[in-house]
Image (spheres, rainbow, N blue to C red):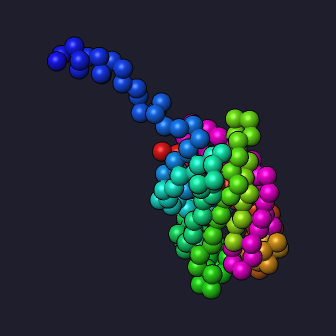
């Protein structure tokens, strides 16, 4: 009996080798909005528990879709949090949607189609590169407030101005 148990345990494979290389399990979604103003840089982030599976080279499921609560972004202080919510019209449009489809290997990384709906506008990006690391898939897109019919915030009679361009950076954390 001991010999059989030793044989079975000796031939056991670690779990990591049992996972198919054509499957990516996503555990969490992190989105950051990064930009500049006349007084410096700003960063607002939102961490979402999000579980999903991507099947590469398959017709089963090769997409992810998540709703993002605009009121859950954290910018570092109450005033900036309020400014972001006002700017993106969070009362009228409380949720944004991110959809990632057509995920394909691209060297050691991936390419995909990204659709990001914020307010009543949808931004579409074809062949967006998702950088593949051990911990997550990472992507970034540059956006202008004017592309989504929003005005960059200003304060103190225009002395403090947020630049029109900002970056949406996201990480799809792997399990």
Residue depicted at 70% across the width and 54% down the height:
102
Left or right: 14, with 28 as reference point: left
Left or right: 125, with 135 as reference point: right
Q: Range of the magenta residues?
A: 118-144
Q: At which x and y percent is residue 105?
A: 70, 41
In the rendered view, would you say 61 is above or below 77? above
Within the image, what quadrant is residue 134 found in? top right
- In the image shown, does 74 or 130 lie closer to the viewer? 130
Residue 22 visible (yes or no) = yes
Residue depicted at 48% across the width and 30% down the height:
17
Q: At which x and y percent is residue 38?
A: 78, 63
- In the image shown, does 132 or 164 lie closer to the viewer? 132
- In the image shown, does 169 or 52 lie closer to the viewer? 52
Q: At which x and y percent is residue 157?
A: 77, 80
For this orientation, the residue located farthest to the bottom is 92
For this orientation, the residue located farthest to the top is 3
Residue depicted at 33% across the width and 18% down the height:
10
For this orientation, the residue located farthest to the left is 1
Does the magenta run of residues contain 130? yes
Does the magenta run of residues contain 93? no
The count of marks equals 0
- Quarter of the picture holding the N terminus: top left
- In the image shown, does 137 or 30 lie closer to the viewer? 137
* Magenta span dominant secondary structure: strand
Q: At which x and y percent is residue 121?
A: 75, 76
Residue 81 visible (yes or no) = no
């Amino acid at each position: 009996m001991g010999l059989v148990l030793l044989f079975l345990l000796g031939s056991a494979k670690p779990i990591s080798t049992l996972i198919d290389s054509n499957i990516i399990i996503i555990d969490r979604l992190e989105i950051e909005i990064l930009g500049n103003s006349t007084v410096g840089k700003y960063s607002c982030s939102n961490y979402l528990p999000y579980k999903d599976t991507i099947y590469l080279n398959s017709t089963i499921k090769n997409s992810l879709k998540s709703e993002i609560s605009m009121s859950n972004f954290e910018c570092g202080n109450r005033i900036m949090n309020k400014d972001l919510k006002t700017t993106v019209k969070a009362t009228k449009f409380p949720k944004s949607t991110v959809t990632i489809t057509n995920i394909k290997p691209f060297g050691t990384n991936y390419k995909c189609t990204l659709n990001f709906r914020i307010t009543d506008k949808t931004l579409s990006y074809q062949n967006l590169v998702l950088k593949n690391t051990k911990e997550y898939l990472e992507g970034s897109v540059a956006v202008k407030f004017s592309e989504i019919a929003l005005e960059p915030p200003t304060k103190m009679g225009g002395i403090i101005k947020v630049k029109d361009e900002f970056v949406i950076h996201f990480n799809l954390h792997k399990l």
